[in-house]
Image (cartoon, rainbow, N blue to C red):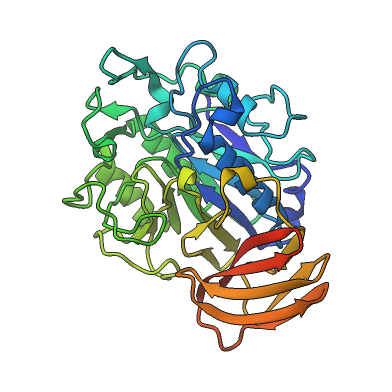
Amino acid sequence: MKKQILLLVVACITTLGSFAQFSFIHLSDMHVSTTPAANSDTNAQYFQCAIKEFARLNPKPSFVLVTGDISDIGNMQPLGMYPAITQHLFPPSLTNPAAGAYFIDSAKTIPIYFTPGNHEYWTGFDSIHIPISNDTLFYYPHYITPDTDYVIQTASAVIVCMRSGHDSPYGYPPNPELIMGTGLSNAQCSWLRNILRNNSSKRKIIAMHHPPVNAVGTNSDGSPYTASVIADTATNSLQNNRTNFLNICDSNHVDVLLAGHEHQNVVANRKGDTISEIRPNGTRYVQTAAAFNRSFRIITVDPAFVTVSPPMRSCLGTGVDEVNHFSDISVFPNPARDKLTIECHQKATLEILTVEGQIISRIQNAGSKTIIDLVNLQGGVYIIKAKTSQGITIRKFVKQ
């Protein structure tokens, strides 16, 4: 199948030709079920909550990118994950979207793109609940994306979305994070090398499900990751062409690799050393914890650098029954450097907290527009809690 290149000509992306800097959301491991009733799918409800937050970000993300395990059983008949995707995740007005034409908002201003994970190959379960899988993605390119490997092009960057293979070995060990992907074919490596060489002057980002480099990180809540033993950098990674792939990243100066699968947050270099999200030298191998645990990152791209935010969480402090009960507040810019603006349509008590819950400052009877000085605040992720007569609203922002 001929690999596809998306030139991003939809409404919100056309501005990328005029403005060199843009941002997007990285998610992974949504694990939306295949049950027909949306109100029985907690993972889908978390996602519905998250996309409302993403749509209110300022600046608005240019798109959302999900690196695999979109639904629990992606190749299940009939139509694979397509019914689950269309019934559970998107605004009701977006009925039966075409492959590669998904959006998180009914106005169709923020596209969402996908790469396949190991769950996309699953066809069901046997009598003792072991997944039945195959080695093809029959439904995926028909309904979800324009191809199993494709490219998103902008004026300043190239984002390469790739499949990293089905479960290896078949079957399912007791710990789901012990599954490797079969990896990349020689044809995929050649195609990737050509894409990167033809875009040598641009920032380069690769997105796939399995992490090519593994290291021990943290869970969504910031606690140490202990779900599986990561013995070395190749644990739970790519079975075929892993070294070849890493060499391609090195020789073509890939900025960032975005992955999931492990359900943890970590950034590593090729050697497996954990490094800063904004380390300037070499490829940063980034894992983002599971979207069903409300994890995400903001990726900001400009001609000089790709900035990866610290791990963030959507809909903090809310249950799924509170999804539609937020007060109408806006927080921008996000990420922020010197000042943060909070707009609220009614009087509110505002609190700025650390992710651990420590209150940094409190503003009583805040008006419709509040500007907060961030000069003395250390870089990191913070929480804004707005208390109004309608209830409590939680927002997050990144101090750069």
At x 29%, y 51%, the residue is: 213
For the point 26% across and 35% down, which residue is it?
179
**Would you say residue 1 is visible in this rendering?**
no
Observer-nearest of 349 and 67 = 349
Query: Quick check: 400 above or below 56?
Result: below
Total numbered labels: 0
Residue 186 is drawn in which quadrant? Answer: top left
What residue is at 73 percent from the left and 61 percent from the top? Answer: 19
Relative to 238, say whether 361 is above or below: below
Q: Is residue 61 visible?
A: yes
Residue 395, how many percent across, how many down? 63, 62
Q: Quadrant of the C terminus?
A: bottom right
Q: Residue furthest bottom?
A: 376
Where in the figure is residue 180, as x and y percent of width and height? Answer: 26, 36
Left or right: 342 as drawn, with respect to 304: right
Going by the image, does 238 lie left or right of 222?
A: left
Image coords of residue 98 (percent x, y): 67, 24
Furthest residue toward front: 389
Q: How far from the left and from the top, in percent, is residue 143?
A: 59, 22
- Residue at point 48%, 11% (across, down): 77
From the viewer's side, name the closer residue of 330 and 116. 330
